[in-house]
Amino acid sequence: MKHVFAFGLVSAQFVLLAALALLPHGALWPVNPGVLVAAIVLCVGGVSLAVLGVVGLGPALTASPIPREHAPLVTTGVYGLVRSPIYTGLMTGGLGLALFGASAWHLATWLALVLLLAGKARWEERMLLAEHPDYAGYGARVGRFLPGVGRLRRSA
């Protein structure tokens, strides 16, 4: 059942990302050159961060939020800045798509993506805490999606 839920979460994130790319453009704000540049920077930055996260995981990489058994805990590289760089990259790129899309549907879809990835990250972290004794200390030092923001509290 856990694997089915994980597959559902991964599928939902891809559906939301596809929707951000394919929804018709709106007119909530003008997509002028400044907005276009900001959208491109967010998309390129988001994709770059996600790729760095994928490459940085090495043998620990899995499409599922369920951690690979006996895989090492990665805390260096981009993982020394944020615990979930792939999710941060997807959120950032998604924001770029929403900015370019300029519709209420784009904003709602991006918010749904953020909420989905936040929930997925929390579930994944519970499993990482159970798998890696060092994860609690790592999580207390490194922010979840932004450097220094969303650090785990050290237990007394």
Image (cartoon, rainbow, N blue to C red):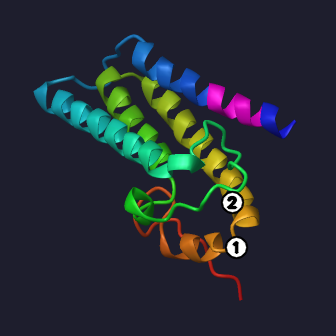
- Which mark is drawn over residue 86? none
Q: Secondary structure at mark 2?
A: helix
> Residues in magenta?
5-11
In the rendered structure, which disc, 1 or 2, sits on the residue that comes first in sequence? 2
User: In percent of the image, x 21 and y 23: which residue is there?
Assistant: 31
- Which mark is drawn over residue 133? 1
Q: Disc 2 marks which amino acid?
A: Leu
- In the current view of this chain or complex, which residue is farthest to the right? 1
Query: In the image shown, does 119 or 112 lie closer to the viewer?
Result: 119
- Which mark is drawn over residue 128? 2
Q: Secondary structure at mark 1?
A: loop
- x%, y% of residue 153? 62, 77
Q: Main secondary structure of the magenta part?
A: helix
**40 lies left or right of 46:** left
User: In percent of the image, x 41 and y 18: which residue is there?
Assistant: 21
- x%, y% of residue 103? 39, 22
Quadrant location of the C terminus in the rendered image: bottom right
User: In percent of the image, x 41 and y 41: which residue is there?
Assistant: 50
Q: Quadrant of residue 72?
A: bottom right
Q: Residues within 10 Å of mark 1 (few under 14, many from 20)?
A: few
Q: Disc 1 marks which amino acid?
A: Pro
